[in-house]
């Protein structure tokens, strides 16, 4: 009998009469959409999948419906990893690396690295960025727990897993204020620590919560869908080229016969020939003329 999976969803849950909340996320088609665009060595793929699950979990810890970006920049085999979730729970991600990449701890895979979390509320509001050193963290989950401890001062535990099929994660967080059950956080944290990567990837959310917390009063909320989507566009690419300046773009055109811009996140290509380039900068130089109604 095949177990019905939770696919591309985020589930929030709370423990009744406590100040502890939780979130579960499973990525299937959204994770496969990332893997279809680039082939990653297994250790890079695992880290990228874990990061994608993590950024969706992190998006539930902020008040605003903006974007949340997780970035790892290191001196090891994996030099850069960027994942982002945007309003509507649209996710995307990419990683850069240098061969060879061997399976190991986070410190071994990324070396000396910085972990940055950027929250952009949009609508003209100020962005917030928190940066911490990953140090000797053995896993991405441990590094993120350190981020919450130093930047948010909220006790937080994460469990992350990914393979070539799906990525998944669970977050437990103790909210400010005293709950009725003084021992709840310690008890629930220890129960969560028994979760295995295989269970996180294979069990449905209801099965997983029953497996871990069957003696607790857990309230599971309706699922929110998650999907892969990139926000690149011709207009954004036009703006990028205008930012380079006409001399730089003409040089690229002369060297390559065309200007080719490819989105790293989704692989969509934008090509410009000589006519496109001249029109692009001619349009930029046109003065605004008021419309006249006849």
Image: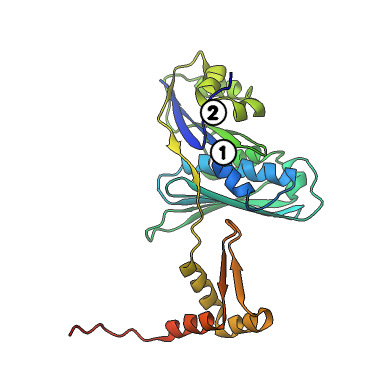
- Mark 1 or 2 closer to N-term? 2
Q: Is residue 95 visible?
A: yes
- Crowding at mark 2 (Cα within 10 Å: few <14, some 14-19, many 20+): some
Instruction: Return the residue at label 2.
Output: 5
Left/right placement of residue 289 relative to residue 93 reads left
Crowd class of label 1 (few under 14; some 14 to 19; many from 20; radius 10 Å): many
Note whether 170 is above or below 97 in the view shown.
above
Distance between the alpha carbons at the discs numbered 1 and 2: 10 Å
Residue 28 image label: 1
The image shows residue 166 at horizontal and vertical percentages of 61, 37
Q: Give the residue displayed 77% in from the left and 52% down from the top.
A: 77
Q: Is residue 54 visible?
A: no
Q: Which residue shows up at 45% across the image and 31% down it?
A: 12
Q: Residue at x 68, y 41 (%)?
A: 46
Residue 210 in the image: above or below residue 287: above
Q: Residue at x 56, y 18 (%)?
A: 211
Query: Residue 178: x percent and y percent?
Result: 43, 26
Q: Secondary structure at mark 2?
A: loop
Q: Position of residue 105 (x, y in %)?
A: 75, 40
Q: Position of residue 33 (x, y in %)?
A: 58, 47
Which quarter of the figure has residue 272? bottom right
Q: In the visual, does 140 lie left or right of 67?
A: right
* Callout 1–callout 2 Cβ contact below 8 Å: yes
């Amino acid at each position: 009998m095949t177990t019905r999976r939770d696919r591309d969803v985020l589930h929030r849950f709370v423990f009744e009469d406590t100040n502890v909340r939780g979130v579960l996320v499973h990525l299937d088609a959204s994770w496969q959409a990332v893997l279809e665009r680039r082939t990653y060595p297994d250790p890079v793929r695992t880290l990228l999948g874990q990061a994608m699950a993590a950024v969706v979990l992190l998006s539930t810890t902020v008040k605003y419906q903006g974007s949340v970006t997780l970035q790892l920049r290191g001196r090891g085999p994996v030099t850069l990893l960027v994942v982002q979730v945007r309003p509507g729970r649209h996710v995307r991600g990419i990683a850069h690396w240098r061969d060879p990449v061997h399976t190991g701890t986070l410190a071994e895979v990324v070396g000396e690295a910085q972990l940055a979390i950027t929250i952009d509320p949009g609508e003209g509001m100020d962005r917030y960025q928190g940066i911490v050193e990953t140090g000797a963290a053995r896993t991405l989950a441990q590094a993120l727990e350190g981020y919450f401890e130093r930047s948010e001062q909220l006790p937080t535990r994460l469990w992350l897993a990914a393979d070539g099929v799906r990525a998944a994660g669970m977050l437990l967080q103790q909210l400010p204020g005293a709950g009725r059950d003084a021992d709840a956080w310690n008890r629930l944290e220890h129960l969560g620590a028994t979760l295995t990567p295989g269970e996180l990837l294979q069990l449905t959310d209801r099965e997983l919560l029953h497996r871990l917390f069957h003696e607790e009063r857990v309230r599971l909320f309706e699922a929110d869908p998650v999907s892969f989507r990139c926000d690149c566009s011709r207009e954004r690419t036009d703006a990028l080229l205008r930012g380079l300046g006409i001399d730089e773009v003409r040089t690229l055109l002369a060297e390559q016969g065309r200007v080719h811009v490819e989105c790293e996140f989704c692989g969509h290509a934008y090509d410009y020939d000589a006519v496109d380039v001249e029109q692009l900068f001619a349009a930029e130089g046109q003065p605004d003329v008021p419309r006249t109604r006849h």
